[in-house]
Image (tube, helix red, strand yellow):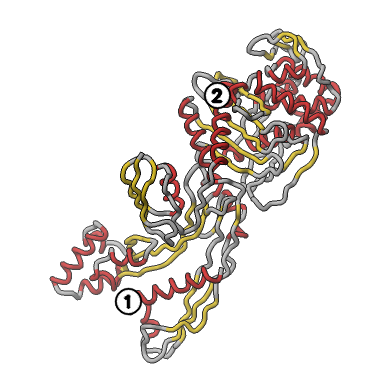
Amino acid sequence: MKDKSYTRAILVVGIFGAFTALSFIRLVVSPLWGITKKNWNISVPPERGRILDREGRVLASDTFIYKAYLDLSYLKRVYSRSDKGTQFEMERALHLVTNLSTSDIFSKKGFLFLGESKEKSDLLSAIPPILLKFTNISMSMERRRAAVASLPTILGKVIDGKGISGIEKFYDELLRGRRTGKIVLRYSGFVNLQPEVEKFVPPIDGSDVTLSINLDLQRVIYEDLLEAVKNSSATSGNAILMESKTGRILAMVTTNNWNDNVLGYIEPGSTIKPVIYSIALQTDSATPSFHHNCTGRIQPVRGLNIFIRDIKPHGEVDMRKALVVSCNTATVKIAGLIKEKLGISGFYRWLKKFGFGEKTGIEIPGESSGVLRDPRRWSAIDYAEIAIGQGIGVTPLQLISAINTVVNGGVYVKPSLNLNSPIQSRRVLDEKVADTIRSFMVEVVEHGTGERAKVPGLKIAGKTGTAQKAINGRYVKRYHSLFIGAFPADDPKYILLVHIDDPKGEFLGGDVAAPVFAKIVEDMIGIHEKKPLKIYENVMPNLIGLSLKDVLTISKLLGVGVKIHGSGLVRRQLPAPGTINPHCLEVWMDH
């Protein structure tokens, strides 16, 4: 940090040099005029720590911004004492930089903002020389973040140096600068316009935070999800990619402008069924040889005129087939066996073990705990509706964590966005129980409701879900389409959730969300087959061979404008790879 803070000190002193060189004596030197004070103290602001992705690429960082303000009080005094010719030149210059009339400008008080720039020289060159002595230039820190692929919903915002949402808020104490630095300038003689640095006390900057997010995966998943939402005329979409063994989040994507993966909740539909079947086996409420004749509907509570239906009758099913074809009536029957064995309170406690109704503790402030009512408030039919994913609210993050427990050998792993956070896990199911349900989930993809999630050469354990939406307390013909899959199925390394909200036309999870899952996994494989491009802060990477989309993403990350010639792939670039602190980017492309 010392090198960075010293460079910052030089920049601060450089402002003083610019002031004196441009006759800014009134602004800076007047406090010394006619007095014997020989030392002048200047504050050096500390930098907020950077937020990095798992490959070390900068997602959020501080940058210096120079801002120019016009001192209207001083301007008016000099203007009133100037001759007509000087007044005319001043008026013309004022209109040039403000696009306002002189009368409009003089009707204002205090300071008038003229503009800002990352480069002091660019800012000064834009101000007519006749106005320079009326101009104050300040230097401030501005937080810059990667505004791509829904990353802002994870990173959050900073206002006045304080994190107010997302990662910026959760780690605000760690990221925030610890101490302001100081430069002591020594003046000799009457007025020395080139002061010497007598003492430098470096600022103590904030610490960096490295996320588990992989920028390449985040971007690809966002693009696939955005395309799926568009193709299905849906309201929005969500996707979470997590390492099954560690709980570390590789991508957390939403097409909304807020993090509904964590802050919002949905009904999970049939994606909850692996949890229900696991509870049944673990508590000996049912066995894999469980038998049921599905006629297409079931009355969970005798005497209550409410029926739960399937899309079609499934006939004779055991537990394996019931999950493969996502049989509602069999699931209600199994839930009834759990209720008989454990009681409502016992059923509720087992749902809590999978994390439902509890915050996961993810590093996003404001996380929702979902909706899992106290069992004392359950109606007679709630046990059945919850078993098929109705009457329970889960965040997408809760849902993927619960299903991960099943595919991860029965071990719940706390999800995290911090690459360096310790792995926190606890056993929920016997490994044998978890392996049995996972094997059923493989068949869901091989020849069940999740067939459209297949990826050639890769075994996947998955589950579809279609949840009817409740609006104003009534279920309507609008749906949440879901698919969750873990791969490779024999020893899962990754688990991926896809949620499409309110698709038009096809709406079943197996028809809408499952193909999106397959597309994302295929694109993941493509990313791993090529060496990822590494981007370092303030360093121009080699763009040769990249697409327009890649160039635009990188230009945003670097905070530079881009001029593009042609189309296709990049064949030539300026500045050259390795250029430090690039100010602009120009590329030539062809097919």
| Residue 474 visible, this angle | no
Query: Against 38, is 84 above or below?
Result: above
Q: Residue at x 51, y 46 (%)?
A: 152
**Label 1: how many Cα within 10 Å (few below 14, some 14–19, many 20+):** many
| Quarter of the figure with the C terminus | top left
Coordinates of residue 499 in the picture (x, y in percent): 58, 30
Tag 1 residue: 24
Q: Are marks 2 and 1 in contact (CB under 8 Å)?
A: no
Going by the image, does 543 lie left or right of 374? left
Tag 2 residue: 512
Going by the image, does 331 lie left or right of 201? right
Q: Residue at x 79, y 42 (%)?
A: 426
Query: Against 1, is 416 above or below?
Result: above
| Residue 514 visible, this angle | yes
The amino acid pointed to by label 2 is: Val
**In this orientation, which residue lies closer to the viewer: 378 or 280?**
280
**In this orientation, which residue lies closer to the viewer: 88 or 9?**
9
**Image quadrant assignment for residue 317:** top right
The amino acid pointed to by label 1 is: Phe
Q: Given the current orientation, which residue lies at the most extreme left position?
A: 85
